[in-house]
Amino acid sequence: MSVIIGCVRDGKVFLATDSQRTWGNVVTHAETAFGANVLRMPEGVLVGVACNQAVKRGIAAHPDWFSDLKGEPLTKRHVMERIVPELNRETEELGEIDECAKEQGRSLYNGTILLAQGDRLFCIDGDFSVQRVADYCLIGHGSEYAVPRMRGFYRKELSDGETVTLLGEALSDAAVYSSQSSAPFKLYDTATNETANIGG
């Protein structure tokens, strides 16, 4: 599980993440889009996935969750009515729903997901609740170490360049204290089809 920071800007959303892959004592870094924490889906939707690879691959296998937007903006209603039920089914089929929670009639999985399109950012939490994010949101293992810098220095008045620098610094903070996060750090945005290296 890695750190992902979503940040709403004027007309777009940035998603910034580390690239570390961790399996027990084995540490590598994602070198391709297949291993990345952020997936590019139809209709310009970016999906930041902070959970295990099985869930990430399950989401990647379902571009239809997004293609049926058919040019319409991503909304909380679409996320709750179209994506959440499918995500719940997918995690259930993958055996990722917490067994104790199931016995209590609830659905919980170990992960958090960010969905970004245009200037809209949504978070699907581990209990499948959905919220729209107005400014920024941090998810993943070690994200708590990036919170102080974002809380202390983020302002909507920052330029895009200043915001990107801040995102890189926040990810660096997480990498210092979390064994499951490290550079190189990657930046995605909903306005372009490009991926950039930042900070680190």
Image (tube, rainbow, N blue to C red):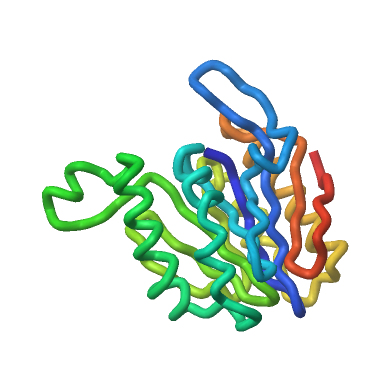
Q: Nearer the viewer, residue 158 or 111?
A: 111
Q: Residue at x 36, y 48 (%)?
A: 91
- Residue positioned most to the top: 25
Q: Quadrant of the C terminus?
A: top right
- Residue 193 location (% of width, % of height): 80, 60
Q: Is residue 173 visible?
A: no
Left or right of 177, for residue 85? left
Residue 136, image x and y in percent? 61, 66
Position of 149 relative to 158 (above/below): above
Q: Residue at x 59, y 45 (%)?
A: 3
Q: Is residue 91 above or below residue 163?
A: above
Q: Whole-percent x and y of residue 11?
A: 76, 79
Res. 167 visible in picture: yes
Vertical comparison of 198 with 69: above or below: above
Rendering quarter of residue 177 = top right
Q: Which residue is outermost to the left?
A: 103
Q: Position of residue 145 (x, y in %)?
A: 58, 45
Query: For this rendering, which residue is in front, 20 or 64?
Result: 64
Residue occupying the far bottom of the picture: 72
* Along the line of sight, the residue nearer the viewer: 86 or 112: 86
Asked if 59 appears above or below 174 in the picture, the reply is below
151 sits to left or right of 31: left
Residue at 62% across, 35% down: 181
Query: Which residue is at 63% across, 60% downward?
Result: 41
Label tally = 0
Residue 18 sits in which quadrant?
Answer: top right
